[in-house]
Amino acid sequence: MSTRSPGAVAVTARGGVARRRTTTFVIGIVVLVSTAACVLALGLIVDSSSPFDAAFAAQHGADVTATVDASRATQAQLAGSGRLPGVRALSGPYGEATITPVIGRAPGGYIAPPITLVGRPTPGGRLDDLVLTQGRWPQRPGEFVLSANSGLGLQLGTQITAHGVPGSPVLTLVGVANSVGQSADGWVLPAEIPALRVPGSPPTAQLLYRFAAAGSAAALHADVSALAGSLPRGTIIATQSYLAVKQQENTGIAPIVPFVVVFGIIGLVLSVLIVVNVVSGAVVAGYRRIGVLKSIGFTPGQVVATYAGQITLPALIGCAAGAVAGNVLAIPVLSSTANVYQVGTLAVPVWVSVTVPAAMWCLAGLAAIAPAIRAGRLSAVQAIATGRAPFQGRGYTAHRLLAGLRLPRPVTIGLAAPFARPARTAVTLAAVLLGATTVTFAAGLTGSLNRVVVGLSHSQAEPVQVDLPSGSTGGPKNFGPGGAPRALPVAVAERTTVAALRAQPGTLRYVVEADERVKVVGLTGQVYLTAFRGNARWTGYDLISGRWYNRVDEAVVPTNFLTVTGMSVGDTVMINDAGRLIPVRIVGEIFDTTNQGLAMLTDWRTVATADPRLFPATYDVGLRPGTDPRAYAAALGRSLRPGGAISLNTNDPFFLTLTALIALLTLLLAVVAGLGVLNTVLMHTRERVHDLGIFRAVGMTPWQAITMVICSVAGTGLAAGLVAVPAGMAVHRYVLPAMAHAAATNVPASYLAVYSAPELAVLALAGLVIAVGGALLPAGWAARSAAATALRAE
């Protein structure tokens, strides 16, 4: 076939693909992994911009969740409300019951805050599809599924007893689910609801609505008014708008977005960098063959077309497979992300699955064309000479200098190898640097988040709390026979609680607090005020600036309180409590997000004189080292019965999911960086196959060959690791405050100072580990190559 015929290019390209199977395979694999990483990274970035909206659409969220008194309207009337003008969809009615759960089987459990359970036959439906994140859906009476947003944090298999309900029904937790509209605290089978209702309470039910116009609070208010007008008076007891849930979720999502975006950007840059390096390296490695093609009459245009076809074919396959792999990989990652965002379910947008592979394929083609054009302009002799070895003089100085060191010769040859291809080495260095930076950043972020979760939950300082419910007379209440509330004098309740706490051998210390809402002069809305009676320094509130209060009329406040009021530590604010103005001096800034940071902690005496109705609400309990909080709570519950509700301050599972997501993304980016190293070493080994054959012929052992190949990237990896440590620390010091500022708070200095000297020493080796891991496969190939085979392969 004439070299001038159009078919010559296609035949030559196919021959190149078949002849250079290793290079073709590497290109396909690298493009596949890079495309998958890009699909996932861009999907994360896109989903981070509006995760609630994406989940709301995917789960067919309800615009309004209405609680109705089913005794005031017939089933036909309730169903007829779905045919009103403007109502697009109706789901329900689902029976519901509010119970006070006792964690564990009575009488050995402890009382938790009330929860609302809804009866649904399946997790799916026309509206509000529930996403099971753990376990399964109830299959028989006595089983229930808990909402991930309930705040109870129970383990599968935990049993709860419905307090105050005839027969004390016992339910076993069999699953955990997400409702994008937070429609309930848990779900049971419909037949279970009647047995869970407190005698005398109305038979309430839940209705879920979608409206044609629901983009604003005013539109939803009009829709709800129309519903109320269509049903008998008093039927609708309460409604919840998706806009309120969205605002709450977006507030919680905002702190997470910065770190997700950082991982996404690193993944995109790393993938593009490696694809360009792999493809351009493959073309450069084929310079000798390009010289042969030119010597038999190929034109520069044919050379470019040949290598563009030779590269784009495996790249096309890799891009298509990468799009599929990215979506498959996205299932567990976005599931974790959805748990972090607490929005139910997320998916890679279709346009991302189409655009990313197309862009990657174009990128691979452009990366191949640029060096191919350059090679096509060379003469046949120049191309062959360039393909045989790097440009004259490159790396020779490094070889001479390293040869003078008292190191084994395979080590010095390997250490000098990167200087022969400085451009390729630079790209490899950048890839390893990004991977190692991600490892350092992830280690710091994980350490900081561990401190954040402890600082917000107070799980270490005060793992147990005893809540004294407020009775009709303003004081605590107790439960008599049959669950009927009865008044209990405050003094009696306190003596009973204190005696029970002192009787428990695991009690280390405790402090009583009162919680109320007050007005701050000049500030709209209410501020949550917590007044402690006794020393509360140990309760787990970390200081950002200033100090803890020491005297009456002093207080500590979160960051957002200072931001909203325009105050600073040292200023005095006026609070209005029970109609009396009380000056309070701010002496410290604390890390706390209660009520979006509009809170205040002070001494009991600061407000007690102004508010004689101030009653103790909670006892915060610190435990002796080694005491199991759950066993302690159960024992305390037995001694207090009948008495107040006992709750455990446990670490939010949200942060455990977040930590797992960080680890998964870090591993993915490290693998992508390792593939970049594998490509570099493979290209270098293929280019130096003649030298390798000579080395093996003069007696180089397989282990010496492995040492030489590994040392060729060891210096690059070590240098990248040393640079990655300060780079990762810098990213950490930028991202963590950005996450905190999105949550309207600052962070204590201790939350940033999470790197220890031994940890930094280990992290400095991350680049070396990534580089060596990527070099192992080509090193093994070099060790197995016989001298004659290597020389013949050249």
Image: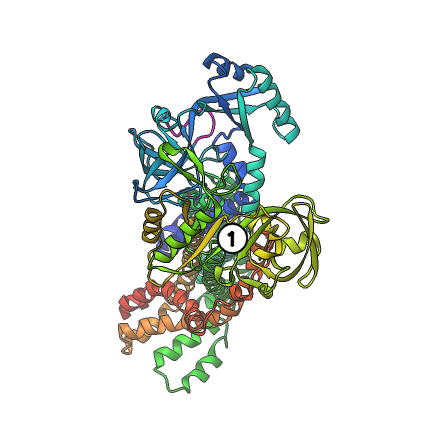
In the image shown, does 227 or 249 lie closer to the viewer?
A: 227
Q: Which quadrant of the figure has residue 137?
A: top left
Relative vertical location of residue 545 with respect to residue 92 in this rendering, above or below: below
In the image shown, does 583 or 760 lie closer to the viewer?
A: 583
In the image shown, does 196 or 31 lie closer to the viewer?
A: 196
Q: Which quadrant of the figure has residue 606?
A: bottom right
The residue that appears at 51% across and 21% down in the rendered structure is 89
Relative vertical location of residue 793 with respect to residue 703 in this rendering, above or below: above
Mark 1: amino acid? Glu
Does the rendering let one see residue 315? no
Q: Residue furthest right?
A: 522
Residue 186 location, x and y as percent?
A: 41, 35
Instruction: Answer with left or right where residue 163 lies relative to residue 229.
Output: left
- For the residue labelled by badge 1, is the local secondary structure a helix, a strand or a loop? strand
**Residue picked out by circle 1:** 513
Stretch in magenta: 122-129
Residue 7 location, x and y as percent?
A: 45, 44
Residue 93 location, x and y as percent?
A: 45, 21
Instruction: Answer with left or right where residue 48 lies relative to residue 415.
Output: right
Q: Main secondary structure of the magenta part?
A: loop
Quadrant of the drawing holding the C terminus: bottom left
The residue that appears at 50% across and 77% down in the rendered structure is 393
Residue 194 location, x and y as percent?
A: 37, 24
- Residue neighbourhood size for the residue with mark 1, other residues' Cα within 10 Å, grouped as few (<14), some (14–19), many (≥20): many
73 drawn magenta: no
In the image shown, does 452 or 38 lie closer to the viewer?
A: 452
Relative vertical location of residue 647 with respect to residue 413 in this rendering, above or below: above
Does the rendering let one see residue 592? yes
